[in-house]
Image (cartoon, grey):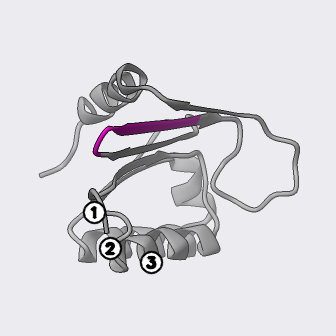
Amino acid sequence: MGEPVRGWFSTWTMNRGNVLDLLELYDTGRLASVTMLTGLYFKRREASVYATLLEGIQERGQRYLAFLNHTKLILLQAGGNHITVEGSANLTSNPRLEQYVISNDRELLEFHTEWIEALPWRK
């Protein structure tokens, strides 16, 4: 099946479909680990979707943090691949014009994972 894929995800808000897709990727082994960041807006405005994400992440022993966040990132690391997706879109299905930059660059992925890992994670 190849190298395990570790994933870090950051968005301001999410929709239910994307939460369920993320959990399914973990459940099917396509993601070996999930670190998820959202904004506080998501926690307040989408309470039931937030609860689904929080419960799903906790049940699977993965990490989630809601804070004053507005970044939109997808970081995937597997073997020699270090994929960074930076863009303007949240993890929702809004029909808007969005932009992305997709890179396979170890230093860029490490830049982002370093600030993510420095956040105040609860043990």
Quadrant where the N terminus is found in the figure: bottom left
Q: Mark 1 Cα within 10 Å, few/some/many (few <14, many 20+)?
A: some
Secondary structure found at label 2: loop
Any mark on residue 24, and which? 3
Q: Are marks 1 and 3 in contact (CB under 8 Å)?
A: no
Amino acid marked by disc 2: Gly
The span from disc 1 to disc 3 (Cα, nearest Å) is 11 Å
Secondary structure found at label 3: helix
Q: Vertically, is 87 above or below 45?
A: above
Instruction: Residue 71: give x, y in percent of width and height.
Output: 55, 34
Q: Vertically, is 76 above or below 14?
A: above
Instruction: Residue 104: give x, y in percent of width and height.
Output: 48, 32
Amino acid marked by disc 3: Glu
- State whether the magenta stretch is mostly helix, strand or loop: strand
N-terminal of the two: label 1 or label 3?
3
Residue linked to disc 1 = 32
43, 98: nearer the viewer? 98
Q: Are marks 3 and 2 in contact (CB under 8 Å)?
A: no
Residue linked to disc 2 = 29
Residue 111, by quadrant, is top left
In the image, taking residue 63 as reference, residue 81 lies left or right, namely right
Q: Mark 3 Cα within 10 Å, few/some/many (few <14, many 20+)?
A: some
In the image, taking residue 120 as reference, residue 108 lies left or right, namely right
Secondary structure found at label 1: loop
Read off the magenta span. Answer: 79-85
Q: Are marks 2 and 1 in contact (CB under 8 Å)?
A: yes
In the image, taking residue 48 as reference, residue 2 lies left or right, namely left
> At 39% across and 28% down in the image, what residue appears?
112
Instruction: Residue 115: give x, y in percent of width and height.
Output: 32, 26
Amino acid marked by disc 1: Ala
Residue 120, by quadrant, is top left
